[in-house]
Amino acid sequence: MMLTFLKIVPKNLLSRFVGCLADTRISKPFIPGFAKRYKISLEEAGKPIEEYPTLNAFFTRHLKPGKRPIAGEGDAKAVVSPVDGAVAQCGPIRDGKLVQAKGREYTLEGLLGNKDEAARFQGGWFMTVYLAPTDYHRMHHYADGKVTGYRYLPGYLWPVNLKSVEGVDQLFCVNERLTSYLDHAGTPSAIVKVGATIVGKIRCTHTPTESNCGEAMKAETYAQPVPVRKGDELGLFAMGSTVVMLFPRDAFLPEPVCEPGQRLKVGQLIGRLS
């Protein structure tokens, strides 16, 4: 029923409208109810709840120092979780396809929107992590390296919850997404940030480009790659969404925690570059 309703709703326009409201002081009275509804840990928040001027300011809150220790600092091969969230799917990329849900797949080329970029990850490994409204919604770098570029692909803003993932074909190929490309001492990786219904904003520290602004596709390869360290801030989501991490063939050895249903925290060890 909900997916049928959403087919006729202007999801992007609705998301921009709600996003504008969530960025105004009109939304401030809704913060306590939102925090209670989603059982958000106020003890972790960087400042008292009453000091957040808008719902979006609270939703994209920083945490107190030390609340997300970074595993493997000083170890260039260690890879950590970039987000708080639940592992939705993970595993090898077979025949250029990734698992979206049981019995439903999508294509690597469709996800990235570029055949040459997809070729780098054919036969590699992927992990999809879903961020619920209760989660901390800033993203952090998962390994030492350099940001080499990005690609923004406009699209729809379907929800990314379980019902949508199971019911919308090629969901991660049709929703808005912003991909960051990285290099880790010669080993490439990518993290695809997928937009979702309501606010639908994705922002990254390495580019002013953001999602759901009515812009056309954009892509850039940096002449001067941006150096990053594990734990550095990568960006943020305004409201819930999903990230898809990509590694090339024989380049990543996952930890046992990389299994569907497992909960992750920013900075938690998830594997090693091989």
Image: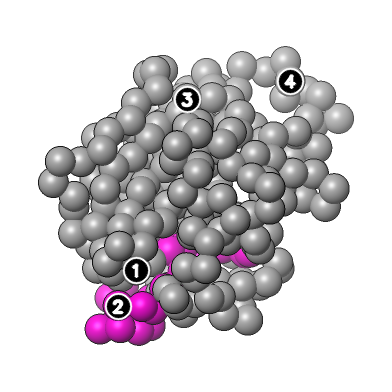
Q: CA distance from mark 4 to mark 3?
A: 17 Å
Q: Is residue 145 visible?
A: yes
* Image location of residue 95, percent across then percent down: 68, 47
Q: CA distance from mark 4 to mark 2?
A: 45 Å
User: First in sequence: mark 3 or mark 2?
Assistant: 2
Task: Characterize the local packing of mark 4: few (<14), some (14-19) or many (20 or more) Cα atoms within 10 angstroms.
Answer: few
Q: Is residue 71 above or below residue 223?
A: below
User: First in sequence: mark 1 or mark 2?
Assistant: 2
Magenta part, dominant SS = loop
Q: Which residue is identified by label 4?
A: 7
The amino acid beneath tag 4 is Lys
Disc 1 to disc 2: CB gap under 8 Å: yes
Task: Characterize the local packing of mark 2: few (<14), some (14-19) or many (20 or more) Cα atoms within 10 angstroms.
Answer: some
User: First in sequence: mark 3 or mark 1?
Assistant: 1
User: First in sequence: mark 4 or mark 2?
Assistant: 4
User: First in sequence: mark 4 or mark 3?
Assistant: 4
Q: CA distance from mark 3 to mark 2?
A: 34 Å
Between circles 4 and 3, the one closer to the viewer is 3
* Image location of residue 4, percent across then percent down: 81, 24
Task: Characterize the local packing of mark 1: few (<14), some (14-19) or many (20 or more) Cα atoms within 10 angstroms.
Answer: many
The amino acid beneath tag 2 is Ala
Q: Which residue is identified by label 2?
A: 76
Taking depth in this image into account, of 214 and 259 the one nearest to the observer is 259
Between circles 4 and 2, the one closer to the viewer is 2
- The local secondary structure at tag 4 comes to helix
Question: Which residue is depicted at the point 67% across and 36% down?
Answer: 171
Quadrant assignment for the N terminus:
top right
The amino acid beneath tag 3 is Pro
Quarter of the view holding residue 48: bottom left
Instruction: Give the residues in magenta.
Output: 62-87
Q: Which residue is identified by label 1?
A: 143
Question: Which residue is depicted at the point 38% across and 83% down?
Answer: 71
